Image (spheres, grey):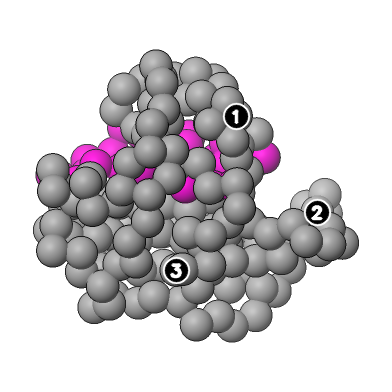
Amino acid sequence: MDLGFDVVDLGSTDHVEAGDTVPEFTRPLVNSEYWEGVALSDLLEERPVVLVFHPMAGSFPATYVWKELPGREWGDCQVVGCSIATPYAHKRLIEERDLGGEYRLYSDPGNGVAEQFGIAHDLDGMEGVAEPRPAAFVVDTDRTIEYAWVAGEWPAFPDYDELEAAARDI
C-alpha cells in the first residue's frame, strides 16, 4: 500500500517516564479567545493534565490528533496540547477544529518544552528545525507522570483508548 509518505524510525530517546516528576515550564497557553504565559504547575493546581505533544498546527497529524481527542471522557483531567506552532496558528487550529473553551494549546516555537521532556526531534532535511515527537503524558496534581507514551516512528499516534483510561484512573 502506498501511503503517500515515508514512515520514519525516530530512534530511541531518553524521555521522561511514568513515575518521574514532570518538568516545569511556562509558555503561551492559547484558547479560543486569547493567550497568556501560564506555568504547567498553575494548571496542575486546578486538576490533573493530559499533555499531548503534536506536530505543528496545520499538519495532518495535528489535525488527526485534535479530531480524536474531543468527545472522550477524560475524568477530572484537562487536556492540553503543545507544539512548535505560534499562538496565531494554534488559535486557527482551535477555530478550525471547533475546540472552543474546553481545550487549550501551549505554543513552544523554540521546542524547549520538548527538549525538557526528552522528545525533541530534528526534522529531516531542515537544518536547525525541530519539533516534538508525538507524545502524551497524564500528569497528576502532585506533578507525577502517571502515564507516558512517546512515538518511536513518524507518523504515530497514541492508543487513544489507553490514554483515556489512564486519565480516568487518576
Whether residue 138 can be seen here: yes
Quarter holding the C terminus is: bottom left
Closest to the observer, 86 or 80: 86
Tag 2: amino acid? Phe
Q: Which residue is mark 3?
A: 117
Tag 1: amino acid? Ala
Viewer-nearest of discs 3 and 2 = 3
Spot occupied by residue 70 in the image (x, y as percentages of width and height): 36, 33
Q: Earlier in the sequence, mark 1 or mark 3?
A: 1
Picture residue at 65% right of the left edge, 80% below the top: 11
Q: Earlier in the sequence, mark 3 or mark 2?
A: 2
- Image vertical order of residue 81 relative to residue 15, above or below: above
Spot occupied by residue 149 in the image (x, y as percentages of width and height): 41, 67
Residue at the far right in the pictured view: 125
Kindly report the distance in space between the C-alpha atoms of the residues bearing marks 1 and 3: 23 Å
Q: Are marks 1 and 3 in contact (CB under 8 Å)?
A: no
Kindly report the distance in space between the C-alpha atoms of the residues bearing marks 2 and 1: 24 Å
Q: In the image, 7: left or right of 126?
A: left
Q: Which residue is mark 2?
A: 5
Picture residue at 13% right of the left edge, 63% below the top: 142
Q: Which residue is mark 1?
A: 89
Q: Earlier in the sequence, mark 2 or mark 1?
A: 2
